[in-house]
């Protein structure tokens, strides 16, 4: 089951990258749908539809595409981050220079390289998402600083105490209960958001991205 979930999930988490990168002009019919990230809690789930109350307080109806995939997250620890791991880190520029992590997702080995790069993210204003390989993970004075590499570049990101660190975990439709927290990378459509993937919180762990 997990093998079926993972490729589709990472595609949804990283499609924003293509929107953030400059591209050559394309014909209108070749343009990809605009992406939107929905963060909130489930109001209702029925068949191919999810009603979600977003973190902004708006209630939206999300259509689930044919063959949509579902996964959740499980708690991990900073000490689980090892050189060679592929991670997704949302971060903000730090006042003293460099970046400070807002959350860390440790991808399973099968997902290494998916969505590699560093690009704008909408978790918080001015935040970025970096999908990269851990080159070095060392203890710093104020916690752990991770050096990651992508496309021949390196970036140092501090991980403050209390930063959520998670990894991918299985989920079933039974986890889509009212009140469950979701992260949904969706496409804007005339009829409302269209989702191919849903990440749901369970067992007290919520998707931090």
Image (tube, helix red, strand yellow):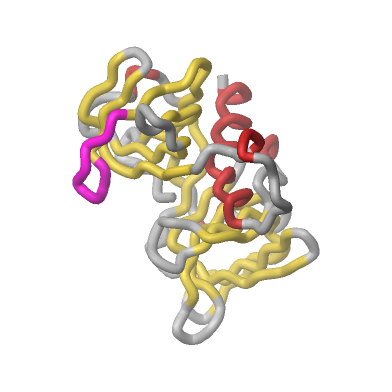
Where residue 87 appears, as percent x and y from the top left, is 61, 52
Q: Is residue 16 above or below residue 111?
A: below
Q: Toward the viewer: 138 or 9?
A: 9
Where residue 13 appears, as percent x and y from the top left, is 53, 43
Where residue 39 appears, as percent x and y from the top left, is 34, 44
Rendered residue at 47%/21% (across/down) = 65
Residue found farthest to the right: 152
Rendered residue at 56%/26% (across/down) = 5
Q: Which residues are magenta?
A: 54-61
Q: Is residue 46 magenta?
A: no
* Left or right: 204 as drawn, with respect to 97: left
Q: Toward the viewer: 99 or 203?
A: 99
* Left or right: 165 as drawn, with respect to 179: right
- Image quarter hosting the N terminus: top right
Residue found farthest to the bottom: 96
Q: Is residue 59 above or below residue 144?
A: above
Where residue 108 sits, quadrant-wise, is top right
In this rendering, the count of numbered labels is: 0
Q: Is residue 58 magenta?
A: yes
Rendered residue at 55%/34% (across/down) = 9
């Amino acid at each position: 089951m997990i093998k079926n979930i993972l490729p589709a999930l990472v595609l949804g988490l990283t499609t924003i990258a293509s929107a953030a990168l400059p591209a050559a002009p394309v014909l209108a019919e070749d343009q990809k749908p605009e992406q939107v990230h929905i963060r909130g809690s489930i109001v209702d789930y029925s068949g191919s539809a999810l009603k979600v109350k977003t973190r902004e307080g708006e209630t939206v109806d999300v259509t689930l595409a044919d063959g949509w995939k579902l996964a959740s997250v499980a708690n991990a620890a900073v000490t689980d981050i090892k050189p060679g791991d592929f991670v997704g880190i949302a971060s903000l520029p730090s006042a003293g220079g460099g970046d400070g992590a807002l959350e860390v997702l440790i991808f399973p080995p099968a997902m290494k390289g998916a969505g590699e790069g560093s690009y704008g993210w909408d978790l918080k204003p001015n935040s970025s998402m970096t999908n990269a390989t851990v080159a070095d993970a060392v203890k710093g004075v104020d916690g752990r600083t991770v050096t990651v590499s992508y496309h021949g570049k390196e970036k140092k990101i501090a991980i403050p105490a209390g930063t959520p660190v998670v990894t991918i975990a299985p989920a079933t439709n039974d986890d889509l209960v009212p009140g469950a927290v979701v992260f949904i990378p969706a496409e804007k459509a005339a009829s409302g958001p269209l989702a191919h993937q849903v990440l749901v919180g369970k067992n007290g762990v919520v998707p931090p991205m």
